[in-house]
Image (cartoon, helix red, strand yellow):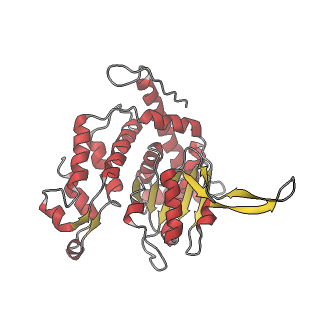
């Protein structure tokens, strides 16, 4: 696939060749999903949401119990999209330097001694941070600062990270001893929280057949890093209709207890999503439309992506928890406003 972003625009807001480019991109993304599906079984929604996150240039938090192929998902995406990938296992004793890198003092060729920077695993295009909530707050902050700024500072020197740069972090929801939950401000840096569940019966049967034989399926490369960067630039040219913008703003703003007139939200929500949620939803609906071979997003895209984009950007109060209300229930209430 080759994507070239032209600057020659028409009165409609599209480039003259944008329709052909978007169609070609949609076909390529379908091939990406098909290749990933050769290795990852029964997780179509997870694969789609992960691909949307990468296409938007964002980072994702994968939440699921062990053994659901989260690590393999990251490795497979690295292969299919042509990105250099690295993995770090987060533990309580992991230090920021173990992720970012450090300077070492060594003998200089001309005599004397000098410092040399040794880059850490964060210098990759696709980084998996496994069990991020097991890392200390200091280490979490170092990683999330790199995610936000796409650069790291070591000994007063700033080092740019590769482009594109994406972090897919995992979190285990059932083992909470010895963990450091991510603060809300850091969770907001993730474009999506993707919940990874168990595969259905048919998918698990197919997985058994394909993974316990003499040969395992392998995914082939479909894109390159340069093509991904061009695709990310092309995505920003996809127009979003006023009705869709109004709809996503209505959902996001209605989730804020201090600005909504909804008594249920005021009673159950401690704090709601900020403007970064609106930005993420605007980009994500564009990506979903392109993946579905459409030139513009619709309200259906907003409804489909509201949960993965909003659920880590909201918190319930004690009254809601006492009544058995969940974040999913609250987001369903918000989405009902657009149905």
Residue 209 vs 20, above or below: the answer is below
Instruction: Write down the quadrant of residue 119 in the picture.
Output: bottom right
Residue 36 at least partly seen: yes
Instruction: Write down the quadrant of residue 71 in the picture.
Output: bottom right
- Judge from the rendering whether residue 213 lies leftward or rightward of residue 184; answer left or right: right
Residue 195 on image: x %, y %: 40, 60
Residue 149 vs 195, above or below: the answer is above
Residue 308 on image: x %, y %: 36, 55
- Judge from the rendering whether residue 159 lies leftward or rightward of residue 247; answer left or right: right
Q: Quadrant of the N terminus?
A: top right
Name of the residue lying farthest toward the front: 112
Residue 217 at least partly seen: no
Residue 197 on image: x %, y %: 41, 62
Residue 83 on image: x %, y %: 60, 46
Residue 254 vs 138, above or below: the answer is above
For the point 46% across and 80% down, the residue is 177
For the point 51% across and 72% down, the residue is 136
Numbered-mark total: 0
- Judge from the rendering whether residue 115 lies leftward or rightward of residue 91; answer left or right: right
Q: 257 or 333, which lies in front?
A: 257
């Amino acid at each position: 696939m080759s994507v070239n972003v032209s600057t020659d625009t028409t009165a409609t807001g599209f480039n003259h060749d944008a329709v052909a480019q978007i169609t070609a991109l949609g076909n390529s993304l379908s091939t990406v999903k098909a290749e990933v599906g050769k290795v990852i079984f029964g997780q179509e929604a997870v694969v789609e949401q992960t691909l949307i996150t990468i296409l938007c240039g964002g980072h994702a938090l994968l939440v699921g119990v062990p053994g659901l192929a989260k690590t393999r998902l990251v490795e497979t995406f690295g292969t299919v999209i042509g990105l250099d990938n690295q993995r770090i296992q987060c533990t309580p004793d992991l230090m920021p330097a173990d992720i970012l890198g450090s300077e070492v003092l060594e003998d200089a060729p001309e005599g004397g001694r000098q410092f040399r920077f040794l880059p850490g695993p964060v210098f990759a295009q696709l980084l998996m941070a496994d069990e991020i909530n097991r890392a200390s707050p200091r280490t979490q902050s170092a990683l999330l600062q790199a995610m936000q700024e796409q650069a790291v500072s070591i000994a007063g020197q700033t080092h740019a990270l590769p482009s594109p740069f994406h972090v897919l972090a995992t979190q285990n929801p059932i083992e909470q001893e010895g963990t450091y939950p991510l603060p809300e401000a850091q969770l907001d840096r993730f474009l999506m929280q993707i919940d990874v569940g168990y595969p259905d019966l048919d998918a698990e049967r197919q997985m058994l057949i394909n993974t316990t034989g003499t040969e395992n399926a392998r995914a082939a490369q479909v894109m390159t890093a340069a093509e991904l960067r061009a695709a990310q630039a092309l995505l920003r040219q996809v127009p979003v209709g006023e009705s869709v913008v109004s709809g996503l703003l209505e959902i996001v703003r209605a989730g804020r207890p201090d600005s909504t007139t909804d008594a249920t939200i005021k009673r159950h929500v401690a704090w709601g999503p900020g403007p970064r949620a609106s930005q993420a939803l605007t980009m994500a609906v564009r990506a979903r439309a392109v993946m579905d071979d459409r030139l513009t997003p619709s309200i259906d895209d907003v409804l489909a992506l509201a949960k993965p984009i909003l659920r880590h950007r909201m918190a319930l109060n004690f009254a809601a928890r006492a009544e058995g209300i969940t974040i999913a229930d609250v987001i369903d209430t918000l989405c009902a406003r657009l149905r």
